[in-house]
Image (spheres, rainbow, N blue to C red):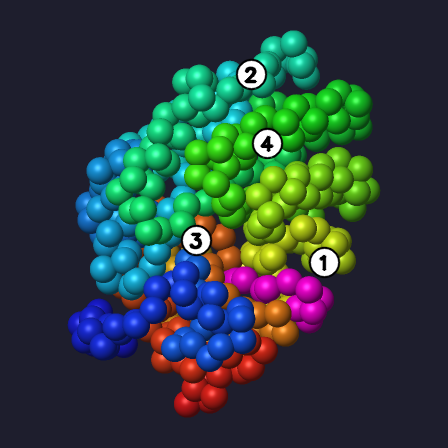
Amino acid sequence: MNKEELKEEMKSYKPEITSSERISKYLSGERVDHIPFAIMSTNRIIANHLNYTISDMEDVDKLSDIIQYKYDNYKIVGLTEELSLRTMGHAVGSKLIFPEDDIDYIEEFVMDDKLDMNLIDLPDPYTNEILAPKLERARIQKERFPNMAIETEIPGPITTAAAIRPIEKLLRDLRKNPQGVKELLDFCFEANMKWAKAFKKEFGPTSVMVVDPVGCDDILSPKQVEEFSMPYLKKQLSAYYELNGIKANLHICGHTKKQWKYFKDLDIDFFSVDNCEDLEECKKEIEDKLIVVGNIPPVEVMRYGSIDDVIESVKTCIKKAADAKCGYIAATGCGSPVKTPIENLDAFIYAINKYGKNAKLGEMPEAINE
């Protein structure tokens, strides 16, 4: 399928319900127009289409354009003010570089020389020069789109720690200074909670998306996961649930198969699995307790693949996971890269609408065999 053919096909995509309504109805057991979807970092794709840079997305007026575009074209609703993987590190003293049209990165870590808790203080989201503007931006979003729910995204404790202490040194500390690492993880837990509590104070109980790439099997050994990652992640997730009365959701980039056995005991509703893992295998492990989310490849398929590549990848994921007992949400396996073409977003939605139509919880859509 070429761009012109896809554009013509998308003219008939006129959903009668919003993305939020679809997920709610689907998870309550109602039959819906098609499988729910949640493409990670959709805003980046729309920004590129509107000729906005990554830096432009910090402008709340341009962000509003993106939010409106998602609603007008796809009935995608929902607002997010996220703490990136590096935001909390930035808030306590790490120095970041912000390219005009790429993802930010850390130039200097606040704990580059040594793990010293005297170098950092818990940031107040209302006065911290990094966090306070984000809270204000969230307020403006909610004022402009009052009928849309707002949520926040917060990294897991060990991922937050890796924005304060360089990861190679943090990993060395796991062996040479384990107690120091645990003190840092306790700090990260408290810092993340201060943000979550401020967010609830402003907007009421909200959903929290937790991302924790440093906690993956590619970086940590099973023993390190059990000692340094999982206890603090579990504590953080339970604290969000206690705070909001809403279970958080979890995404971990990279391999996680060795940890799937733990996920069913976490206070989460869904687990988003990276595309490096087999979606069907993950489904079989967690489907009795968790909603399965994933896992179209964001780089090989969404960024660099053809329209047909996207369609085939979506079909494959539907075949592997659409009949999950607790539900399936089609998504990318990680965040969509900068400059992902808009036609591949359209191709994703086209495929979900065609091959995932008439979806119901726990059922494989008949359309997948067409």
> Which numbered tag is attached to residue 264?
1
Q: Is residue 81 visible?
A: yes
Q: Nearer the viewer, residue 73 or 125?
A: 125
Of the numbered discs 2 and 4, the one sitting upstream in the chain is: 2
**Magenta segment includes 290:** yes
Compared to residue 179, the image places residue 121 above or below, namely above
In the picture of the structure, the residue carrying the numbered disc 3 is: 40
**Magenta segment includes 175:** no
| Quadrant of the rendering where the C terminus is positioned | bottom left
In the picture of the structure, the residue carrying the numbered disc 4 is: 193
Of the numbered discs 3 and 1, the one sitting upstream in the chain is: 3
The residue type indicated by label 3 comes to Met
Q: Is there a contact, CB below 8 Å, between mark 3 and mark 4? A: no
Between the C-alphas of marks 3 and 1, the distance is 22 Å
Which segment is the magenta one?
284-295
Task: Give the SS element for disc 4.
Answer: helix
Task: Tell me the mark number nearer the camera, choosing from 3 and 4.
Answer: 4
In the picture of the structure, the residue carrying the numbered disc 2 is: 110
User: Residue at the spot x=30%, y=72% of the render?
Assistant: 16
Task: Tell me the mark number nearer the camera, choosing from 3 and 1.
Answer: 1
Between the C-alphas of marks 1 and 2, the distance is 35 Å
Task: Tell me the mark number nearer the camera, choosing from 2 and 4.
Answer: 4
Between the C-alphas of marks 3 and 4, the distance is 24 Å
Of the numbered discs 3 and 4, the one sitting upstream in the chain is: 3
Between the C-alphas of marks 2 and 4, the distance is 20 Å
User: Residue at the spot x=61%, y=40% of the render?
Assistant: 243
Between the C-alphas of marks 4 and 1, the distance is 23 Å
> Would you call the spot at circle 4 few (<14 residues within 10 Å), some (14-19), or many (20 or more)?
some
